[in-house]
Amino acid sequence: MKPQIAEPQIGFWYRSEVGDGHSCDPQGEGGPGTGVLSAAGIPVEFVPLIQKAGTPCPAYPAPVLTADTQQESGFKPHGANGSNASGYTQFIPETWDKYGRDTTGKGYADTNNFSDAVDA
């Protein structure tokens, strides 16, 4: 008898607003990106910020935030691309206006401030 092979499950991860005005994937627990953060290759001063930002939403844990930031900017500020995206995590202005927030008390949200960028 030929073994049965399950078809891949393809789903859409969506974001919904949570209490603090940020968004979270309600299906995140056990979903993509689960795992433990490896600090190798991450600037040491960013590790606690990534861990903090990755805690509230199970779909975007620290390893996912790390991979995203590495891919988008290589942990370098002031990055920009042809889509008008900027900063550590390459937000376009319209998205930053919705999700960016000041996490350090400086009075404004800044894509080139790592704490603000990774939190968004």
Image: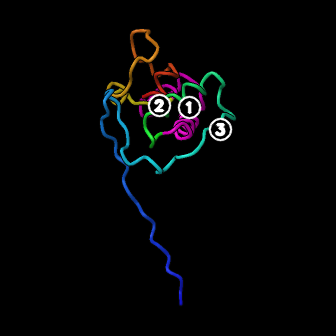
Mark 1 Cα within 10 Å, few/some/many (few <14, many 20+)? Answer: some
- The amino acid marked with disc number 2 is Gln
Range of residues picked out in magenta: 61-88
First along the sequence among labels 2 and 3:
3
**Percent of width and height locating residue 9:** 42, 63
Contact (Cβ within 8 Å) of mark 2 with mark 1: yes
Give the x, y percent position of residue 61.
50, 39
Q: Residue at x 34, y 41 (%)?
A: 15
Q: Nearer the viewer, residue 84 or 62?
A: 62
According to the picture, the residue beneath numbered tag 2 turns out to be 90
Which amino acid is tagged 1? Ser
Per the image, label 3 sits on a secondary structure element best described as: loop
Give the number of the disc on residue 73.
Answer: 1
Q: Of the numbered discs in the image, which one, if any, rests on residue 8? A: none
N-terminal of the pair, mark 2 or mark 1, is: 1
Q: Residue at x 53, y 90 (%)?
A: 1
Residue 114 lies, in percent from the top left, at 52, 22
Outermost residue, right side: 40
